[in-house]
Image (cartoon, rainbow, N blue to C red):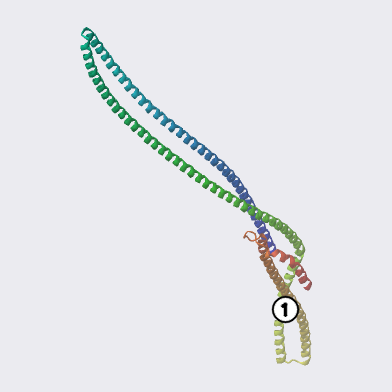
Amino acid sequence: MSRKGTGSKGKGDRADILAGLQAANEELRAKLTDIQIELQQEKSKVSKVEREKNQELKQVREHEQHKNAVLLTELKTKLHDEKMKELQAVRETLLRQHEAELLRVIKIKDNENQRLQALLHALRDSGPDKVKTVLLSEAKEEAKKGFEVEKIKMQQEISELKGAKRQVEEALTMVIQADKIKAAEIRSVYHLHQEEITRIKKECEREIRRLQLDEKDARRFQLKIAELSAIIRKLEDRNALLSEERNELLKRLREAESQYKPLLDKNKRLTRKNEGLSHSLRRMENKLKFVTQENLEMRQRADIIRRPSSLNDLDQSQDEREVDFLKLQILEQQNLIDELSKTLETAGYVKSVLERDKLLRLRKQRKKMAKLPKVSGRPSPARFEATRGGSLPSEEKTTPLLLKTVTVK
């Protein structure tokens, strides 16, 4: 019954181990599928991010180039428009001044012509000599006055032109300074844009490096997944081998149970018989002691009590018969005791041999399990089966020894 209990426990342990291994295999497969899905998702994300980054870089470059071109064209057009406006304003002012001067000169000339015509009419009325002298004097005075007036006008015009020139030069310097300021602003904006472009390039390079590192990590994950899949295949192969070994062991166990069940029953019967014989041996020993004591007492009484010869002879003959009968019984009991002691000795020897064989087999199995290769730092399931259900092969191999014990008995 104890062996059956250990066998059922071994079967239950093996079933638990196999269920645990199957659950671990399923968990590893589920993890592997999850890791593969995550890897595919990461790859798609990485490719998507790379495409987006490249598109963003292209868009940023095109936008910056377009922006710079637009700014340059706008600044050029603004400068040209401002210069043209300033030149137009200077032209208009100069034309207005020239027209005003022309109108003023025309008015003066008209006044002079009217005055001269009046003088001519007056001189026609007077004599010719006087007219000549007067005309000459007046012409000289008029010429002097006109010259002075023209000189003053010319000086005023020169001063005005100098002022206008100064104003134009100042406006030109202002425009040049504004152009320089705008050019400096354009350069600063250009430098800022270049710095922004370099910064974006560096960020993109960093992102590309990070994505490359992520790709390396993904490759590492792929290698790990391949290693795990190889380990899972090894475990599955090992599991298949263990299941085959388990089936073979179960078959051999059933065969061994069918073989040694009658032997066990016979052994139980023999043990019961041995127990009964040992009890009877103890009873016979007690009886022998009691008989020997009675014999001694009777001898003492025979020595003490002396009867008549006839009665004494009768008593002696009866006593001798009883003693002979008791001696025969003692001899039979002694023979039984010797046989029982021999059977007990053989049973003890067989038991010691069985225990020694069991210990030797356990040691051999442990050495074999220690020599087996370890997979991913975990103990092999065969070792669990050997340690937990190690009684099965010993039970299978005990059957010939039990047969030997039965033959000896």
- Label 1 belongs to which residue? 284
- Up-down: is 162 above or below 316? above
x%, y% of residue 110? 28, 14
Q: Quadrant of residue 96?
A: top left
In the drawing, does residue 292 fall left or right of residue 172? right
Residue at the image point whose x is 70% and y is 58% from the top: 242
- Is the N terminus in the top left, top right, bottom left or bottom right quadrant? bottom right
Q: Nearer the viewer, residue 289 or 323?
A: 289
Residue at the image point whose x is 45% and y is 39% from the top: 190
Q: Quadrant of residue 339?
A: bottom right
- Up-down: is 228 above or below 175? below
Q: Nearer the viewer, residue 383 or 276?
A: 383
x%, y% of residue 321? 79, 85
- Up-down: is 396 above or below 284? above
- Up-down: is 409 above or below 78? below
Q: Quadrant of residue 309?
A: bottom right
Q: What amino acid does circle 1 point to?
A: Met
